[in-house]
Image: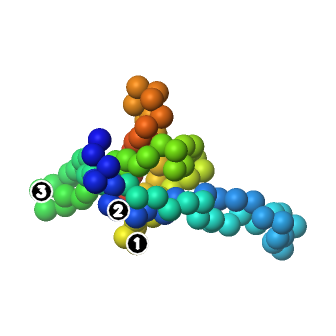
Amino acid sequence: MNRGKLRHLIEIYENKTTDEKNELDENIEKAVCIGSVFASFEFRGGGLLTGRPADSVLSRTTHKFTYVYNNLPILLNDKNWIEYKGKKYNVLFTLNEDENNEFLQVFTEEQE
């Protein structure tokens, strides 16, 4: 991959448990930015849900972010998400192609 394509600054978030308690005496989880990296951004596709032609709705839109592996090597689909240009992208899965630890590809779904 050409590193010149890594021109989009993205923020990666994670829910972390804090020592603060709520009214039920449970620890509160807060969204914490764990890193900002420059990445490439690609539209991968969308699913169309149609009932009648006039009722077409875009139901699923997926994107791929690619960044240098060493910047932030571990992302989990149930714990992390990406924010870019005011939109939130849920992590579906990650791919370390050929296990060479050069680039990490993160496949995401835009949250509505």
Q: Identify residue for label 1.
A: 86
Q: Viewed as shown, does residue 68 lie left or right of 29?
A: left
Q: Position of residue 75 (x, y in %)?
A: 55, 46
Determine crowd level at label 1: few under 14, some 14-19, many 20+ residues with C-alpha closer than 10 A.
few
> What residue lies at 12% left-to-right and 56% top-to-bottom?
53
Q: Nearer the viewer, mark 2 or mark 1?
A: 2
Q: Identify residue for label 3.
A: 53
How many numbered circles are shown? Answer: 3
Instruction: Give the camera-side residue of 62 and 66.
Output: 66
**Sequence-earlier tag: 2 or 3:** 2
The residues bearing labels 2 and 1 have C-alpha atoms spaced at a distance of 13 Å
Q: Secondary structure at mark 3?
A: helix
Would you say the residues marked 1 and 3 are in contact, meaning their CB atoms lie under 8 Å apart? no
Would you say the residues marked 2 and 1 are in contact, meaning their CB atoms lie under 8 Å apart? no
Q: Quadrant of the C terminus?
A: bottom left
The residues bearing labels 2 and 3 have C-alpha atoms spaced at a distance of 36 Å
Q: Identify residue for label 2.
A: 8
